[in-house]
Image (tube, rainbow, N blue to C red):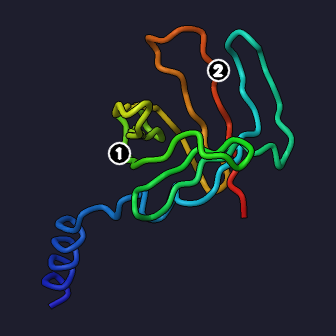
Amino acid sequence: MKIFLITVACIITASCKKTNVIERQTIAGKWELRQSSGGIAGTVTYNPDNGSVYVFDNTKSFRLLAATAIVHAGSYVIKESANAGDWSLQLRFLVNNQVVIENDSIRFNNNQLIFFPAASCCDMPVMFYEKLP
């Protein structure tokens, strides 16, 4: 009987999809810019309440705010990246009635969201955001 129960437990464990890390560690919430590092400007630190905020919700919508004005708004898709600990974030929004799709490599945990520049891109900084309560 023990062998049967252990076998069933192993089968259930193996057949269950790994609980998506993204469900436990969600990007949903408000994230305010705290620092940019690298690029032409070097390292720049931003004060709290600077107004540069990404807002992600659970319906896969996002807004990028600058001093409370909406800079971009649209939908997002997030997937695990080939790089361990990183995610692929795709933002879709309109600019002058044209659909823009931005693909970003990010890393995030409970209180920090980091945007990495594309490897093929110019000298762009790494952007650090802090989760707001």
**Position in image of residue 90 (x %, y %):** 38, 39
Residue at image x 74%, y 44%?
67
The residue under label 2 is 125
Q: Position of residue 121 (x, y in %)?
A: 48, 12
- The answer to whether mark 2 and mark 1 are in CB contact below 8 A is no
The amino acid marked with disc number 1 is: Lys
SS at badge 1: strand
User: Quarter-wise, where is residue 133 in the image?
Assistant: bottom right
- In primary-sequence order, the first of circles 2 and 1 is 1
Q: Along the horizontal axis of the image, is 56 left or right of 14?
A: right
Q: Mark 2 Cα within 10 Å, few/some/many (few <14, many 20+)?
A: many
- Residue 79: mark: 1
Furthest residue to the right? 47
Point 18% across, 85% down: residue = 5
Identify which residue, 8 or 131, lies in the foreground.
Answer: 131
Point out the image quarter for the N terminus. bottom left
Whole-number angstrom distance, CA of label 2 to CA of label 1: 22 Å
Amino acid type, mark 2: Pro
Secondary structure at badge 2 equals loop
Q: Is residue 23 above or below residue 62?
A: below
Q: Label 1: how many residues lie within 10 Å, few (<14), some (14-19) or many (20+)?
A: few
Question: Can you tell which mark lies on residue 38?
Answer: none
Identify the residue at horizontal 83%, vertical 31% (top origin). Answer: 45
Nearer to us in this view, 45 or 91: 91
Which residue sits at x=36%, y=44%?
Answer: 80
Q: Residue furthest front?
A: 96
Q: Is residue 109 left or right of residue 51?
A: left
Counting every numbered tag in the picture gives 2
Q: Which quadrant of the figure has residue 51? A: top right
- Judge left or right: residue 73 versus residue 45: left
